[in-house]
Image (cartoon, coloured by chain):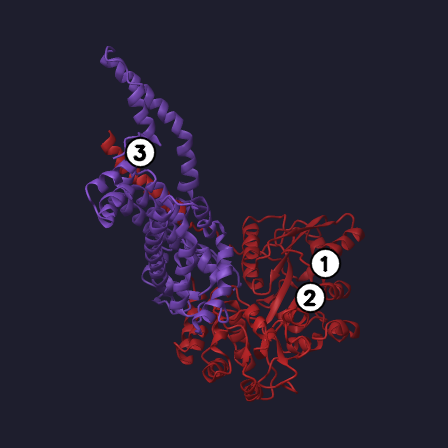
Chain colours: A purple, B red
Amino acid sequence: MSATVIGAARGSDAPPPSEKRGGLQRAQRLRNRNALLLIIPTLVLLAIVIGYPIVSAIITSFQKDAGLDPATGFFVQGGFAGFSNFTHWLLQRCPTGDGGTTSCPPGNLGAQFWNSTFTTFFFTVATVVLETVIGFWMAIVMNRAFSGRALVRTAILVPWAIPTAVTAKLWVFMFSVAGIVNALFNSHILWTSDDWPSRFAIIIIDVWKTTPFMALLILAGLQLIPGEVYEAARVDGASTWKTFWTVTLPLVRPALLVAVLFRVLDALRMYDLPAIFGGGNATATWSILVVEQLRQGPNSASALSTIVFVFIFLIAYIFVRFLGANVVQTTQAQQKGELK
Amino acid sequence: MKASRRPLLVAGLAIASAAALSLVGCSGGGGGSNSSSGGNDRGPITYVQGKDNNNVIRPLIDKWNTAHPKEKVTLKEQSDNADQQHDDLVQHFQAKDSGYDVVSVDVVWTAEFAAKGWLQPLTGSYKLDTSKLLPATVNSATYNNTLYAAPFATDGGILYYRSDLVKTPPATWDDMMKDCDIAKANNMDCYAGQFADYEGLTVNVAEAINTNGGTVVGKDGKTPTLDTSDAKAGLQRLVDAFKDGNIPQAALTYQEEQGRQSFEAGKLLFMRNWPYVYSLATTDGSSVVKDKFAVAPLPGVGSGAGASSLGGHNIAVSQFSKHKATAVDFMKFMESDDSQKYLVVKASNAPVIASLYSDPDLNKQLPYLSTLKKSLDSAVPRPVSPFYPAITKAVADDSFAALKGTESVDQALSDMQKAIKTAGSGS
């Protein structure tokens, strides 16, 4: 957003060359001050809706959860916890009751952190890769001129339009022991209970549900590529594959990266699909773990959500920094109408 | 200018995305002060419970309001979802909201809310007569030897069986396992309960352990008692039945509804489920067992009866209510014979008053009532513990591993024991 403003200011409001240098600086300072005044409300709002919850979560994550006073049977505040809430998750240390710690036994949420980290990453990588590949293919199909294209474009969006909760319920019936999936393959797989089958089921459902979204974003990118480029490639005698690798892919890259970034972040916070579909611990993502912990002890949950926040922040940062620096730049270029 | 701005923009984009996506835990936790404020305060109050789906609560409240024009009750309905009801109550209690005077609490939340100092103990001038009530329901409302809530509606597991194939229902687990030959001969599954990895599994495993004379936690509500031969024998029974195929592997995916569907499709000889199934199995269009099934108490072990886990709701008075005297009176009204009878007739809410189960009119209308009574007589509440969420997680997760066969019974019980112990001693 701010990039457009700056660009526009440079383009149209540039002071005439005859003006003195001091006046130029004053005008610039004035503009900067006005800009600052105008964005203050936004900054305040961001501080409230983003800054406050993060700071509050970090503060409470250093508090012990309330413990039971054996004499009265009532909960008492736990006091300062140091890093114990963090070691609980990262090192899977659980209190023994006499002040010491032990490694968290199965059945304690602390023992599940790395499992759910694995599950979350596995879901993210698998779904995003599949959705990108299939979505790309769908976008190319939709980009071609053929009769009934509008109908196909609409129809392809249907899974995306169905609420996730409904989707999950729908597939629970299909994946039930006596459901259509087992009937088709004449199998007896426990899709909602066994570790790997339930993970694969989640991936299948998520791909079914979200690929259309991916396809739509990629399609938008494809449509920005001018037809002359393909004509030129054809004149030069490039094969279909060659055209794809050297023309389509580089030109659609900005849109593709935005789509992938969206999906990666979306997949990292996946909650509703596994929560409703089931699958127990094998499909427990970070978000599910946070919500479960929230019911057991809010301060440990704060520590967990802080850890998750840092992880997701790093992933988002790395993504934007290394792959997506290009995204920001090209978006600016596109906004100025100077496509590469 | 532009070059230095970009990393900032990049970082900003990353922060914003991550912040928007990560879940942020809310602060809170209970401080347990037990100061009872107010004396004989009377005035209008609010009663909070989940959706009044059968439209039975409104008429009851209207009746109360007509008789008590100066102490009117307003109904506040919560969502249908139990977890959301729990979280809604927690939020209002944490805010010490005096707008929630009387609340409906699931039996498994009662201890947690009591230990956080949110419920008015029913002692002194608020004392409640519990002599007419089913003992198990009173236990479910008792924490730390103090009654914190009034039992309101109860629920117990019963055994559904195919009366066309099995003449006399099995009294013991071993008898039932012997009857599994009948299932084999008819090419159907023998027995199923709720064995998916969720709350229902805790209910079923606790029943197996309690039926064998074991317990999950001790009287203090937090010390695990699973390292006993009784507890082991209980879980072993279920594991063995899975190994023999008497419980089908498919039951590892069963919650209440999947089991009911299998039974109604005629694919299951015995099923442990709640009374709600009775009317559905007799009326559902797709049910092929409409007049071919009957109910019995859960099978026991040896000469002992089967011990059902207890479901249902209690009603409690908030510590922060400004009109506690009215609140307690309203609670007694909801608990009265008349109200309880009205609720069972109109909504099949299992009453908590023992004598109602022998009422001939009620039995005619609800044929499972006498069976349910037998089940409730030997029922055991699930662990009455402020750490219930952690306990149920440990029981369900670890016993699920044992049922699947990925862990031995010994290992599962020892994990359960350790996990419950860590739950009771901090995070």
Q: Position of residue B118 (x, y in %)?
A: 58, 56
Whole-Å distance between the Cαs marked 2 and 1?
A: 10 Å
| Residue wearing tag 3 | A334
Q: Residues within 10 Å of mark 2 (few under 14, many from 20)?
A: some
Q: Is residue A202 above or below residue B308?
A: above
Q: Quadrant of the N terminus of chain B?
A: top left
Whole-Å distance between the Cαs marked 1 and 3?
A: 62 Å
Element class at badge 1: loop
Q: Residues within 10 Å of mark 1 (few under 14, many from 20)?
A: some
Q: On what subunit does the disc labeled 1 rest?
A: B
Depth check: give the residue in front, B182 or A269: B182
Say which amino acid is labelled 1: Val
Element class at badge 2: loop
Q: Quadrant of the C terminus of chain B?
A: bottom left
Instruction: Say which mark, if any, is on residue B349.
Output: 2
Image marks 2 and 1: residues in contact by CB distance under 8 Å:
yes
Depth check: give the residue in front, B24 or A201: A201
| Residue wearing tag 1 | B56
In the image, is B168 to the left or to the right of A311? right
Q: On what subunit does the disc labeled 3 rest?
A: A
Depth check: give the residue in front, B365 or A324: A324
The residue positioned 70% from the left and 68% from the top of the image is B351
Q: Is residue B32 above or below residue A222?
A: below
Say which amino acid is labelled 2: Asn
Say which amino acid is labelled 3: Gln
Q: On what subunit does the disc labeled 2 rest?
A: B
